[in-house]
Amino acid sequence: MLLVIAVAILGFIGFMTWYQLRPETVAQRKADADRIAAERLPRKVNEANGCEVWAFKPGDRWLYFTRCGAKTETTNAWNECHTRTAGKVTSTVCTPKTAVITQEPK
């Protein structure tokens, strides 16, 4: 019985090692790391009427900043979600929220 458990554990460890080292897994981890690094860099997402909107994601939320003339404004955007239960039905309602973090002259 003990031998069967030991073989099962070694088999599981071998499978996990193989899975972590296979080329598809390594490529996916690299692609995810590259995407996260790219999201941390500010990039222009819109421009209209002399104003530019830039976005970057330093953590788990996107941050936006707008440059209009001599003013720069940084805005944090997120969704605020609430779950409601009526009888056996549960629904989630999300409301987009924003907050101005900084306002400073150019």
Image (cartoon, rainbow, N blue to C red):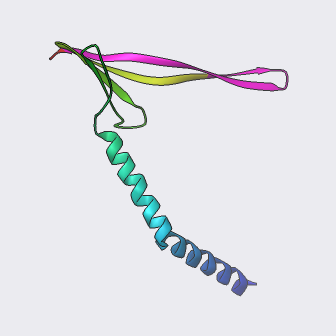
Determine whether, in the image, residue 79 is placed left or right of residue 60: right
Q: In this view, does 75 lie to the left or right of 85?
A: left
Residue 72 lies, in percent from the top left, at 23, 17
Position of residue 35 measured from the top left corner of the image (x, y, whole percent): 38, 48
Label the magenta part by its dominant secondary structure: strand
Q: Position of residue 70 (x, y in %)?
A: 16, 12
* Quarter of the image where the N terminus is located: bottom right
Residue under the point 76% across and 26% down = 90
Q: Is residue 37 magenta?
A: no
Q: Is residue 84 magenta?
A: yes
Q: Toward the viewer: 27 or 89? A: 27
Q: Residue at x 70, y 87 (%)?
A: 3
Report the side of 86 relative to 4 (left or right). Answer: right
Instruction: Specify the farthest residue to the right.
Output: 87
Task: Residue at 46% x, 71% y: name it.
Answer: 23
| Image vertical order of residue 76 relative to residue 17, above or below | above
Residue 105 is left or right of residue 84, and the answer is left
Farthest bottom residue in view: 3
Span colored in magenta: 82-104
Q: In which quarter of the image is the C terminus?
A: top left
